[in-house]
Image (tube, grey):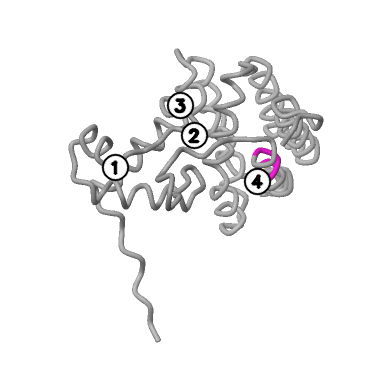
Amino acid sequence: MAFAPPSPIPSRTQYVLEGIKHAILTGGLSPGQALVETELAAQFGVSKTPVREALKTLAGTGLVVMNQYKGVTVRTVDAAMAREVYDVRLLLEPEALRRTITSRASLEAAREALVRAEEATDQAERSLANREFHRALYMPCGNPLLARMLDEVRDQAALVSTVAWAAVPSWKHEAGEHLEILRLALDGDAEGAARALHTHIADFVQRAFPEGDPV
C-alpha cells in the first residue's frame, strides 16, 4: 500500500510559525507567556486558522504548551527540562561530530557560522548563528536519522540557552570553546573535538542549572 508524502505546510502557516519561533528563541516572547490566537492573528495579518496550525506544530517541537484550561503558553524552562534536553545532546552530538570529522566532510558552514556570531550586533543574531554552528557540525555526520534526532531537540536547546543567557550572558566564554572545537575538527582530531564538544555542552547546562538547584 502506497502512502502519500506529507503535505507541505501552507505558506501563511509557515510564515506565522517562523515568526513565533523567532520571537521565542530570541527572547521576544518569554517562557510562560500566553499566546492568544486573536492577538497573533492581528499581529501577523492572517486569520486564526494558520495561527492555530502553527501553534500545534510548535507544541509538537516542544516550544509551546497547549493546556485545555490555560490555553497556549511559551514553554517554561526549568532544571529538569534543561537537563533532559542536554542529556540527549550529550549522548548524540559528540558522536555525530566524530563521524563528520572521520568522513572528512566540509566544515565551511561551521566556520561561516562562527564568523556571523562574532560579527553579530545583538544577542538574537548571535544566538541564531551559534545554533547554525552546532548544526553544521552534526548535519554532515552521514547518518540522516542521527541528524534528524538532533534537529528534534534543537529548538528546545535554543530555548534553554535563551533563558540562560538572559540570566547569565556567558556567550563570550562559549565563543572561545566554539573556536577550540572547530580548530580540533579542522585538524582532523575527531576524538579531541568530540571530547571538547561534550565538555562544552555539559559545562553550559551545569553552569546555567547547577545540580544543587531545585527542579
Residue 78 or residue 126, whichever sits in front: 78
Q: Could you tell which of marks 4 and 1 lies nearer the N-terminus?
A: 1
As drawn, 100 above or below 24? below
As drawn, 57 above or below 189? below
Between disc 3 and disc 2, the foreground one is 2
Measured in 3D between alpha carbons, the distance from the residue under mark 3 to the one under mark 2, in whole angstroms, is 15 Å
- Does residue 84 show up magenta in the picture? yes
Between disc 3 and disc 1, the foreground one is 1
Residue labelled with disc 3: 26
Residue labelled with disc 4: 100
Measured in 3D between alpha carbons, the distance from the residue under mark 4 to the one under mark 1, in whole angstroms, is 42 Å
Give the class, few, some or many, for how many residues have Cα within 10 Å of label 4's Cα (few <14, many ≥20). Answer: many
Q: Which residue is at 56% across, 46% downward?
A: 139
Which numbered tag is attached to residue 32?
Answer: 2
Residue labelled with disc 1: 37
Q: Which residue is at 40% across, 36% downward?
A: 34
Q: Could you tell which of marks 1 and 2 lies nearer the N-terminus?
A: 2
Which x, y percent locates residue 130? 55, 28
Between disc 4 and disc 1, the foreground one is 1
- Does residue 113 show up magenta in the picture? no
Magenta span of residues: 82-86
Measured in 3D between alpha carbons, the distance from the residue under mark 3 to the one under mark 1, in whole angstroms, is 20 Å
